[in-house]
Image (cartoon, helix red, strand yellow):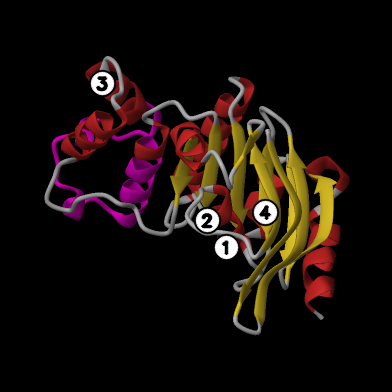
């Protein structure tokens, strides 16, 4: 579903990505773990067609990103560090706005379903600016899911969530994976990555330092891989 080969991205003399090769299957959840500056966000932006690689290739759902950007954007949901929500609009109004952009059929039903999933149905009429950071993050995730994308690219989706909300997010991601969604998410939180109990890819200085199933990595060995690769 998602494949990168020898992906390189440079900014002047700095290499943000240095030969990253990954293959992610349909329905798989992959946690991309690494310190700040490891290249996690850069990789997601390339996959979301928001940045071009310096060299290497990317295929998503069998499509070449360099040639089929428009079609890929229809099939991808990208959650960045910016929520892309309008502060003065309500949660409901924000989702209706994006539903029109994506031409989502039966939008009202879909929006109610998503607001229920992210635990915001009772806050749907409130302006976004009155919602907590965690609530805004959950609403941003609902926005990403509106058009039922095949592939989800989530940049630190648990950021700002309390423990209960993070647990709910983990359950939701598992449900989406079971339904066939392919999910690549970034985090620098080793505990969250281990909690997912899925595949974990450690990225350090733009290179894949380790790629393993979470059940093969106890928290201590995962931390050793993370810290050892930074040394």
According to the picture, the residue beneath numbered tag 1 turns out to be 42
Q: In this view, does 89 lie above or below 221?
A: above
Q: Earlier in the sequence, mark 3 or mark 1?
A: 1
* For the residues bearing labels 3 and 1, Cβ distance under 8 angstroms: no
* For the residues bearing labels 2 and 4, Cβ distance under 8 angstroms: no
According to the picture, the residue beneath numbered tag 4 turns out to be 32
* For the residues bearing labels 2 and 1, Cβ distance under 8 angstroms: yes
Residue 19 lies in quadrant = bottom right
SS at circle 2: helix
The residue nearer to you, when weighing 133 against 64, is: 64
Q: Position of residue 196 (x, y in %)?
A: 67, 41
* For the residues bearing labels 3 and 2, Cβ distance under 8 angstroms: no
> In the rendering, which numbered label is found on residue 45?
2
Inspect this view and state whether residue 188 appears: no
Structural distance between the alpha carbons of marks 2 and 1: 5 Å
Q: Where is residue 116 in the image (x, y as percent from the top left)?
A: 34, 26
Residue 99 lies in quadrant = top left
SS at circle 1: helix
Q: Position of residue 201 (x, y in %)?
A: 75, 53
Report crowding for label 4: few under 14, some 14 to 19, many 20 or more residues within 10 A (C-alpha).
many
Q: Which of marks 2 and 4 is nearer the N terminus?
A: 4
What span is colored magenta in the figure?
117-142
Q: In this view, does 122 lie above or below 80?
A: above
């Amino acid at each position: 579903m998602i494949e990168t080969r020898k992906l390189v991205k440079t900014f002047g003399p700095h290499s943000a990505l240095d030969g990253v090769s990954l293959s992610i299957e349909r329905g798989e959840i992959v946690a991309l773990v690494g310190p700040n500056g490891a290249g996690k966000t850069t990789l997601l932006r390339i996959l979301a067609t928001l940045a071009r690689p310096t060299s290497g290739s990317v295929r998503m759902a069998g499509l070449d990103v360099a040639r089929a950007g428009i079609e890929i954007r229809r099939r991808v949901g990208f959650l960045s560090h910016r929520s892309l929500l309008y502060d003065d609009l309500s949660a409901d109004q924000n989702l209706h706005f994006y539903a029109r952009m994506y031409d989502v059929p039966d939008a009202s039903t879909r929006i109610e379903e998503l607001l229920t999933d992210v635990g915001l149905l009772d806050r749907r009429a409130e302006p976004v600016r009155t919602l907590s950071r965690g609530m805004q993050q959950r609403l941003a995730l609902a926005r990403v899911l509106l058009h039922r994308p095949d592939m989800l690219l989530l940049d630190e989706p648990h950021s700002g969530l309390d423990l209960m909300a993070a647990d709910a997010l983990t359950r939701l991601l598992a449900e989406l994976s079971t339904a066939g969604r392919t999910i690549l998410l970034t985090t620098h939180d080793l505990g969250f990555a281990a909690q997912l109990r899925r595949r974990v890819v450690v990225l350090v200085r733009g290179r894949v330092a380790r790629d393993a199933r979470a059940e093969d990595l106890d928290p201590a060995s995962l931390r050793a891989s993370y810290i050892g690769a930074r040394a």
